């Protein structure tokens, strides 16, 4: 197979479809989304059969039980996918929204109007629900999407994609609007990443290794986050009860996700009072603490944290703990070791909160909130295509609006430039 | 000289300065801008002496008179630079502006707040005014800037940068806020373009060759336009007098710039009536037309236009002319040959205008306006750092707002995620 030719064919079909999608009404796009949802539900047996193939192959290949679980499409998960599509259909269409408008002294009217980005490539790992979620969000925002899922989910993804494509056909939308890369070789991805004239944006979703590989090989802009090394800083004025609740929630409610807290910073002034009850509470939930020297003076039973721990995204029931001298040192630490994902301060001091909010250069900065709220749904975006720690275009949780760009429209009556 | 070490030093100083700049009040930044303006005016003799060196070297090196003219800093141009800084000082500060804010059902308040991008690298060619304009805009938006001008302007740029830096010192701002690359070797640029952790954005300004070289070597996001192949489509319902005025203005008012029109598309239905008076009018202004076969049937005296002409950015008194069958064919042509810069329709038919506006995927799309209006000042942005034909972050003219990004700020009272 000629991978380059295949990649170009996919991208050209997507490009052609994107030009038609950009002109579609919300009704038309919503109709397709609802048809997709219905078709998924009608095809439960077909999906399960394909998924069984992937699961059997995965077992043979010795995938861990965590990976096998991610791969599995249960009836409940299938229902979540179709409900997700219905929810996206119910969200307002961002396309065509006028962002700002001004009339210039010469009478011309200049406006900025939201439009789709065009063609988006999504490169992800094992969860097949990403196939459906990403297709729905991209379609609603008027973009054509090229989906490249993990090798281990290829049978499931192929079937899901064919069901989605069928719905496109039934509702008069171009098949190029949602395309799945049907071959598993990595060369196809590398060819896709070179097509900067045909694909406008790449969103990788997965582990840091996958994301770095995509960034290093792409000539197309990539929006991503490498990892979430999230911090909570407990200031001297923090309400200790609130601090215990928030740290506990941010660490234990779902430790394997990118917005779980990984490093706790505690002001020296309260460290003697705060750390022992924290240790007790988290130990009862099987959280392992790793501390700096000052923390270990107070909690001699915890292991020592080294430079690697400050950079670590544990994604596990482990928490690094460092005692710092005030908010400035907390900001310094986050600036040096953080990943620009989500960082929170717990404080009753408004000024200190503002200093933290202004000084921490992360995509989401919280005051008296669990880092676990860093999520498109929680923010009220309605849906989420991913989280960005980049500086350009979109930061933090990305919803439908973040899948659009804008054009300037100028309307005049024959004005010329003097 | 170790170019890598030098690049890292510049970038680290810029990064450190950017963290301080992000926290500065508008008053403080405006004070520095005004001091820069004043210092420039006081240093006229010093600037002229440095500029004379560059001009003499340029003459020796055989630079064209156009290039020498671009290089020259006249008292009038110096005044424009300092007045430009004063104007930027008078513009509202985009930093800290709350873009949107929502209170979630659990009581937490989520807002999106404008912040500086961080460290910006500007890579440009011979005009020394870019040194001052870019420094002023970046500073106002709270960004540290690394300036890399053309080799032929190095003496002028060094002096300008040292004057700007002096003003920073006088007003208590970090010197790292505005830094000039003081060596002319290209290797430094290539080293800078690798520093993705320290520099957040690169804006190249200059010819297509320069921009392609930057894009191909950069690991840092680049915002740019390669060229401006701008179109005007004269629809069948166009007011012919308005059409003549607009095409004339778009071609001749300043032919050497990126928003001048390069290709004229004319609806076949009016081509016999429209093209002869257009030819007469433009010929009288020394514009050379190059036409498709249909155009040459009407205007046998014009040269034949080939595929290269449709892609050409002449930047000169040359205009390609093509007869098309209606707005769809015009959109097709622009989609194939255009550069996503600025394209205009002239029509009295509202529906057709909307079809053009929706169908043309350019950063600026105009109705009954000269393409020459595609400019930050004309749009009312107050100032312009450049024009983007990219899809992400910023499109079209970029002003102060486009030199910022945002962070999400969440404020709560101890909410945890269930």
Image (cartoon, coloured by chain):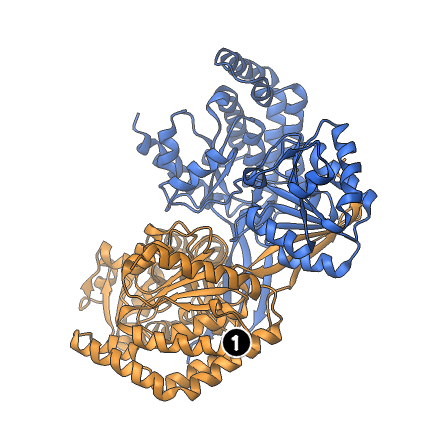
Chain colours: A blue, B orange
Residue B201 image position (x, y, % from top left): 45, 57
Label 1 SS: helix
Residue A299 image position (x, y, % from top left): 73, 36
Q: Can you see residue A146?
A: no
Please identify the quadrant where the N terminus of chain A is shown: top left
* Residue B120 or residue A5, whichever sits in front: B120
**Position above or below: B138 against A315:** below
Left or right side of B17 for B278 = left
Left or right side of B283 for A111 = right
Q: Quadrant of residue A104?
A: bottom right
At 39% from the left and 33% from the top, the residue drawn is: A189
Label 1 resides on the chain identified as B
* Residue B122 or residue A91, whichever sits in front: B122
* Residue B180 or residue A289, whichever sits in front: A289
At 39% from the left and 49% from the top, the residue drawn is: B219
Q: Residues within 10 Å of mark 1 (few under 14, many from 20)?
A: many
At 48% from the left and 14% from the top, the residue drawn is: A61
Residue B202 image position (x, y, % from top left): 42, 58
* Residue B331 or residue A288, whichever sits in front: A288
Residue at the spot of label 1: B88
**Position above or below: A26 against B237:** above
Left or right side of B110 for A338 = left
**Position above or below: A104 against A201:** below
Residue B284 image position (x, y, % from top left): 25, 80
Please identify the quadrant where the C terminus of chain A is shown: bottom left
Left or right side of A204 for A26 = right
Number of labelled discs?
Answer: 1
């Amino acid at each position: 197979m000629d991978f380059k030719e295949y990649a170009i064919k996919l991208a050209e079909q997507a490009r052609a479809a994107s030009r038609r999608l950009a002109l579609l009404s919300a009704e038309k796009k919503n109709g397709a989304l609802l048809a997709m949802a219905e078709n998924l539900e009608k095809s439960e047996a077909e999906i399960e059969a394909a998924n069984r193939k992937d699961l059997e192959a995965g077992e043979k290949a010795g995938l861990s039980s965590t990976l096998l679980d991610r791969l599995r499409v249960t009836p409940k998960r299938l229902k979540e996918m179709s409900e997700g599509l219905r929810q996206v259909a119910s969200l307002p269409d961002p396309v065509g929204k006028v962002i700002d408008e001004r009339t210039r002294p010469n009478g011309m009217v200049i406006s900025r109007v939201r439009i789709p980005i065009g063609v988006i490539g999504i490169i992800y790992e094992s969860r097949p629900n990403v196939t459906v979620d990403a297709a729905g969000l991209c379609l609603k925002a008027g973009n054509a999407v090229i989906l490249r899922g993990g090798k281990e989910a290829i049978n499931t993804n192929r079937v899901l994609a064919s069901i989605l494509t069928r719905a496109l056909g039934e509702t008069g939308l171009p098949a190029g609007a949602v395309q799945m890369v049907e071959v598993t070789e990595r060369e196809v991805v590398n060819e896709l990443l070179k097509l900067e004239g045909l694909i406008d944006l790449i969103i990788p979703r997965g582990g840091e290794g996958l994301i770095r590989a995509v960034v290093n090989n792409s000539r197309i802009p990539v929006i991503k986050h490498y990892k979430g090394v999230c911090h909570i800083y407990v200031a001297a004025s923090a309400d200790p009860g609130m601090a215990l609740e928030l740290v506990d929630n941010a660490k234990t409610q779902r430790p394997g996700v990118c917005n779980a807290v990984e490093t706790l910073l505690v002001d020296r002034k309260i460290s003697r009072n705060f750390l022992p009850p924290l240790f007790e509470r988290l130990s009862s939930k099987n959280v392992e603490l790793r501390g700096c020297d000052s923390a270990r003076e107070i909690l001699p039973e915890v292991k020592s944290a080294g430079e690697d721990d400050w950079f670590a995204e544990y994604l596990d029931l482990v928490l690094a703990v460092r005692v710092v001298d005030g908010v400035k040192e907390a900001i310094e630490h986050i600036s040096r070791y953080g990943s620009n994902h989500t960082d929170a301060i717990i404080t009753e001091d408004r000024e200190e909160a503002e200093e933290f909010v202004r000084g921490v250069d992360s995509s989401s900065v919280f005051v008296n909130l669990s880092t676990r709220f860093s999520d498109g749904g929680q923010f009220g975006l309605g849906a989420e295509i991913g989280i960005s720690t980049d500086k350009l275009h979109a930061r933090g949780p990305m919803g439908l609006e973040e899948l659009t760009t804008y054009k300037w429209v100028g309307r005049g009556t024959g004005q010329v430039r003097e």
